[in-house]
Image: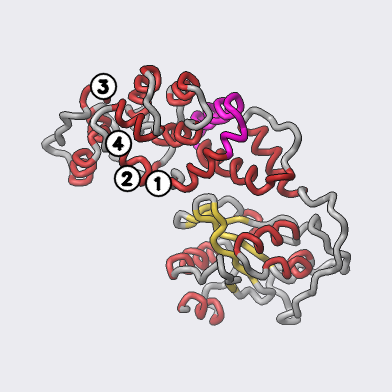
Amino acid sequence: VVAGRAQAWRAPDRADLEVALGGAAMPLLGASYDAGAARVVDVPAWARPVLAAGDVRAAARAAFAVEPTRPVVRTMARCLAPGPTGTPGFGVLALAVVGAGVLSPDALARVLDAPRADHPTAELPDRSTLVACARVAVAWGPHRTERVLTEAAARADGVDRVVRTARYHRELQAQLPARLPNDLDGLHDRLRARIATAAEGTAAVAPLPARRRAEPRPHPIHAAPPARAQVTEATPLSVDARVRALGGQRTEGLEWAVPRTVGDLHRWGGILANCLADFGAAAAEGRATILGLLRGDQLRYALELTPDGTIRQLVGPANRPAERWVRVAAVGALGRAGIIDPSRPANAVWLRE
């Protein structure tokens, strides 16, 4: 259906402006509308050249950068058609883009034709994230990649889970386990557990310098400091349950990340080129709480919550001051979670900077 209607698409007489303009600019999207698709909002930038192609073969060529086989073209057409809820399979298309560099044409067709859940277009990753995931897929190999992607297609959180799993793989690098599971959940959980314990075998290092206590009475999210002990990269951080619950949540397109060990702070400091590595002792003792914000799969911002409930950004060469909309979103989310008081003068100052 999609394949036959793309080149000659015309907007229905009573189509709203967004549908008319979207279908006119992207004929394959228009064909999907003709097949009964619900209105699509926020088509990802990487998908626009694909949907702007004149036919499905050209769309597959634009998506996968190779001449597609007939099975790929056929399953691509079914992927772009609306599913039972009226949503085209853009999430499955994103997964296929991730696997295109390692999968055979037949395996790629199986991914495109996999049973699929709804994947909201506004939550799909950007092009740079897909490229980064595709590099990891090469390391996973064709068999594991096909299984991971087909399992992800059937889950509403599948695309996001693949992105997370690929990020864990990149962060571990030389510390990857010798053997990895082939299924999505097993692979995700094995790598996530490895992230949390990657530095357990490292030698102890000298205690990191502790930051001066800001006020004698700590903010409620900061636990009472335990007895001072030697700090290593494997030392767990003291994190309040409300802060921990933020991990993985999204705010205005950004994803919250919560470090679990001192080693995580060392890695974050290396990524952002700032002083996070110096916060290990304070964070382990509950005298500082560190949060990260990801854009796509890249760590972009690191924030400190001081003992008195003030939010501060840790800047560095790769961690520039956050844009105002990021600051507003962060303060709003932390306030709604009961973690900070947005009306506190120091927090209002950060908002106005």
Residue beneath the point at 47% across and 78% down: 353
Of label 2 and label 1, which has the lower sequence position? 2
Q: Which residues are magenta?
A: 136-157
**Disc number for residue 1:** 3
* Amino acid at dot 3: Val
The correct choice, above or below, for 56 with respect to 193 in the image is above
Asked if the residue at tag 3 contacts the one at tag 2, i.e. Cβ–Cβ closer than 8 Å, the answer is no
**Location of mark 2 (residue):** 41
* Amino acid at dot 4: Leu
Of label 4 and label 2, which has the lower sequence position? 2
The correct choice, above or below, for 150 with respect to 229 in the image is above
Distance CA(mark 2)–CA(mark 3): 22 Å
**Location of mark 1 (residue):** 122
Asked if the residue at tag 1 contacts the one at tag 2, i.e. Cβ–Cβ closer than 8 Å, the answer is yes
Residue 24 is situated, as x and y percent measured from the top left of the image, at 19, 40
**Location of mark 4 (residue):** 51
Residue beneath the point at 56% across and 69% down: 317
